[in-house]
Image: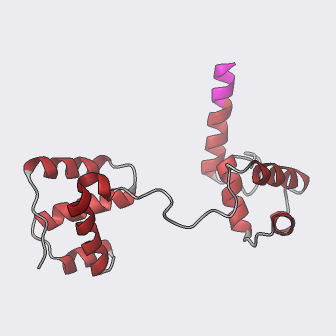
Amino acid sequence: MRFIKLSDSELKSLQRGQRFGKHYLFRDRCQCLILSHQGYSIAQLAELFKVHRTTICSWFDLWESGSIQALHKKPGQGRRAKLSPDNPKHVELAKSLVEKDRQNLKAVVAELSEKLSIEMHPDTLKRFLKNLVILSAASANASKHVRKKISMMKAKETYND
């Protein structure tokens, strides 16, 4: 059986990370190490966090290799976005096509797919547009979160003017 033994300072830093960490994965990793220190086995932790035993072991390895800094997710992990808000070509093309045909996102997706040679689902475009806050508050597809974000941005603009 493998357990993580922590000093008082390490335990306090992990508790801060578990409580105030920005990302859920980092908070989970901190909590897992704390629980291991308290005597939970790898099998119990795997069941509790709904991950495989090897994942728990890799979290332990991360801790042993680089302390709390190693528990953060590295940049570049995960799937690459099909549409990037940092790419001006994607932004301008999506804006212009949505302005032309706001009611039919499937047609916009088809045209975007053709022009950019990227296969995508309408939900991909919706997420991209929500990130750009293009959808207006009056749009039937705009979620409560998007409407709130738009109203906050408008309030900031009028306050700054």
Farthest residue to the front: give it.
65
Judged left or right of residue 72, residue 147 is right
Residue 126 placed where, x, y %?
70, 60
Q: Relative to residue 27, is residue 133 depicted above or below?
A: above
* Residue 110 picture quarter: bottom right
Query: Quick check: 111 left or right of 129?
Result: right
Report the magenta residues as a range. Answer: 155-161
Residue farthest to the right, as pictured: 100
Q: Residue at x 63, y 28 (%)?
A: 156
Tell me residue 6's x, y (percent). Answer: 11, 57
* In the foreground, 96 or 82: 82
Q: Residue furthest top?
A: 161
Quadrant (top left, top right, bottom left, bottom right) of the C terminus = top right
Residue at 62% over, 43% down = 148
Residue 142 visible in the picture: no
Figure quadrant of residue 51: bottom left
- Residue 17, given in percent of the width and then of the height, sits at 27, 50
Q: Name above or below for residue 148 compared with residue 30.
A: above
Does the rendering let one see residue 68?
Answer: yes
Q: Quadrant of the N terminus?
A: bottom left
* Left or right: 27, with 63 as reference point: right
Q: Residue 145: x and y, percent? A: 60, 49
Q: Residue drawn at (75%, 48%), measured in percent from left and top? A: 88
Which one is in front, 150 or 117? 117
Residue that appears at 67% across and 40% down: 150
**Residue 39, magenta (yes or no):** no
Seen in the picture, residue 129 relative to 1 is either above or below; the reply is above
Q: Is residue 20 above or below residue 66?
A: above
Q: In the displayed structure, does residue 58 sit left or right of residue 100?
A: left
Characterize the magenta stretch by its predominant secondary structure.
helix
